[in-house]
Image: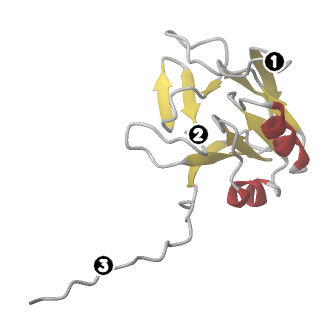
Amino acid sequence: MRIAVIADTHGTLPPSVASQISVADEIWHLGDFCDHTTLDAVRKVGPPVEAIFGNNDYGLNLSQRLLLERAGKTFLLIHIPPTRPGGADFLLHGHTHVPRDEMVDTTRVLNPGSTSKANKGAPASWAWLTIDEETSRVDWVIQLVPALRTPARPTTRASTKEN
């Protein structure tokens, strides 16, 4: 099973990300859509979506947390990471906009980063969470979002005449 994990889209789902995650078995969004338009855009990508409420998701009717089970492993989806993770094999969070893969006691804590507003020098990113349904092995691979390029503006040079 291949799950696209995104977070902190903040009103923007880059087209390159939408294209890449369209082949996922599921999409998990860890909060901060920031508006209905972005929530709808993620849902229209195609695969089933599991989504949680972020601290900037005013007016969106989403759960604060979800506890999911896949291939015998438990995954807690939450936006703001707790001080002491626990209660699941994996805790997935957003909020910091910085990718993370860390063991805290017996819980593996994962953050895909932000698809649109990177933070603390981290690039814009999201992640593939792959679960082998026969062995229950879980792999986490961060994907970088290509820089959004804006068309170059023509430059003008002021001509000066020397005397």
Dot 3 and dot 1 residues touching (CB under 8 Å): no
**Pointer 3 residue:** 158
Give the structural element (helix, strand or loop) at label 2: loop
Q: Nearer the viewer, residue 95 or 67?
A: 95
Residue 1 in the figure: left or right of residue 113:
right
Alpha carbon distance from label 3 to label 2:
47 Å
Element assignment for label 3: loop
Nearer the viewer's eye, disc 3 or disc 1? 3
The amino acid type found where label 1 is placed reads: Gly
Residue 141, given in percent of the width and then of the height, sits at 58, 50
Q: Position of residue 143 (x, y in %)?
A: 58, 54
Name of the residue lying farthest toward the front: 163
Which quadrant holds residue 11? top right
Q: Quadrant of the C terminus?
A: bottom left
SS type, badge 1: loop
**Residue at 53%, 48% in the rendered image:** 124
Three-letter residue code for mark 2: Pro
Lower sequence index among marks 2 and 1: 1
Category of crowding for the residue at label 3, using alpha-carbon neighbours closer than 10 angstroms: few (below 14), some (14–19), many (at least 20):
few
Say which label, 3 or 2, has the lower sequence index: 2
Which residue is the site of mark 2?
Answer: 112
Relative image position of residue 114 (x, y in whole percent)? 57, 40
Q: Which residue is mark 1?
A: 59
Which of label 2 and label 1 is nearer to you?
1
Give the image location of residue 146, x and y in percent. Answer: 56, 61
Mark 2 packing: few (<14 Cα in 10 Å), some, or many (20+)?
many
Could you say which is closer to the camera, residue 9 or residue 19? 9
In the rendered image of this protein, does residue 15 appear above or below residue 159? Answer: above
Which residue is pictured at 79% across the width and 41% down the height? Answer: 27
Mark earlier in primary sequence (3, 1): 1
